[in-house]
Amino acid sequence: MIEKIAEYIQNKIQNFHPDTGLILGSGLGDVANSIKDQIVIPYTEIPDFPRSTVAGHKGMLIVGRIEKHTVICLQGRFHLYEGHNPQVINTAIEVLKVLGVKQLIITNAAGSLNVDFEPGSIMMISDHINFSSRSPLVGPNDEQFGPRFPSMTKAYSPQLRSKMRRIAALLNINLHEGIYAMVLGPNFETPAEIRAFKILGGDAVGMSTVPEVICAVRCKMEVIGLSVITNYGSGMTVESLSHEETLAQSQKACADLTRLILEFLKD
């Protein structure tokens, strides 16, 4: 099935051969506007490809160029809380692998667990904690994509993080660094859960990214993750949380996120 999906996409994108993958989180789809010579394929047209159903995720695969790189962009991701089997995420990443992707840039919208990480800012992920307790690698393993037991010691590439850190300084963008905690969702967390996540070392919390990172590391891709901080966690302020506020705050940070990614790929 992976080869069938990849062959369909390759026929559509003709002579493009992607080396960089880009996965865009809630409200961050506008980053794709910077891709030149675009070929756009709706997920619904790709045989056996999963569907994205959440507001703020357009469900489009976009291929084109950013600077010297050929980029394949997933404008809309697949969340476990939508009812997807975790292995569906593995399918999407394996397709990127077959198409030639070697580095993967993953973005998301996340809630802050750290009082110093204010809404509208960006956090580069240094590590993660998988509170969903679900892995996309459960089930039979295809050795052509990676080992049965991949190491997650350096899941977020130290080299790419060093490069992103340098570029943020050049652009005068305040780039936080911290640990991303994934929960299953779709409900927002309770104040007690937020306190527990902080004690366990989390700096931001969200409902995505970790399954994609696990799959990409197994496929021997270099990975970098960027979280747009959209709100403080439950109980850290008196305000109630909503998906609409998440989308609004992610839009505010989208300009800085776009600058970071473009300069990262240009460098």
Image (spheres, grey):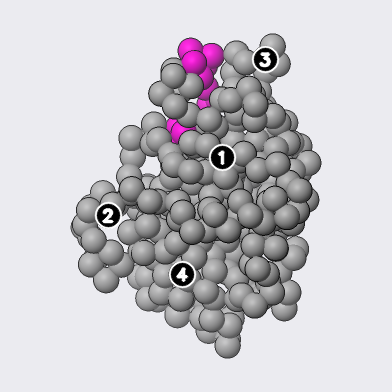
Q: Which residue is mark 1?
A: 177
x and y, in percent, of residue 220 in the image? 36, 64
* 253 lies above or below 12: above
Marks 4 and 3 sit apart, C-alpha to C-alpha, by 41 Å
| Of marks 1 and 2, the one in the foreground | 1
- First in sequence: mark 1 or mark 2? 2
Local crowd size for mark 4, using a 10 Å CA cut-off: few (<14), some (14–19), many (≥20): some
Name the amino acid type tagged 1. Answer: Glu
Could you tell me which quadrant the C terminus lies in? Answer: bottom right
Local crowd size for mark 3, using a 10 Å CA cut-off: few (<14), some (14–19), many (≥20): few
x and y, in percent, of residue 262 in the image? 70, 63
Q: Which residue is mark 3?
A: 237
- First in sequence: mark 3 or mark 1? 1
Marks 1 and 2 sit apart, C-alpha to C-alpha, by 24 Å
Give, as a single range, the part of the protein colored magenta.
181-195
Q: Which residue is mark 2?
A: 150
Marks 4 and 2 sit apart, C-alpha to C-alpha, by 17 Å
Name the amino acid type tagged 3. Answer: Thr
For residue 102, the mark is 4
Name the amino acid type tagged 2. Answer: Pro
x and y, in percent, of residue 17 in the image? 54, 81
Question: Which residue shows up at 63% across the image and 55% down it?
Answer: 166
Does the rendering let one see residue 64?
yes
135 on left or right of 245:
left
Frontmost residue, 146 versus 38: 146
- First in sequence: mark 4 or mark 2? 4
In contact (CB < 8 Å): disc 4 and disc 1: no
108 on left or right of 38:
left
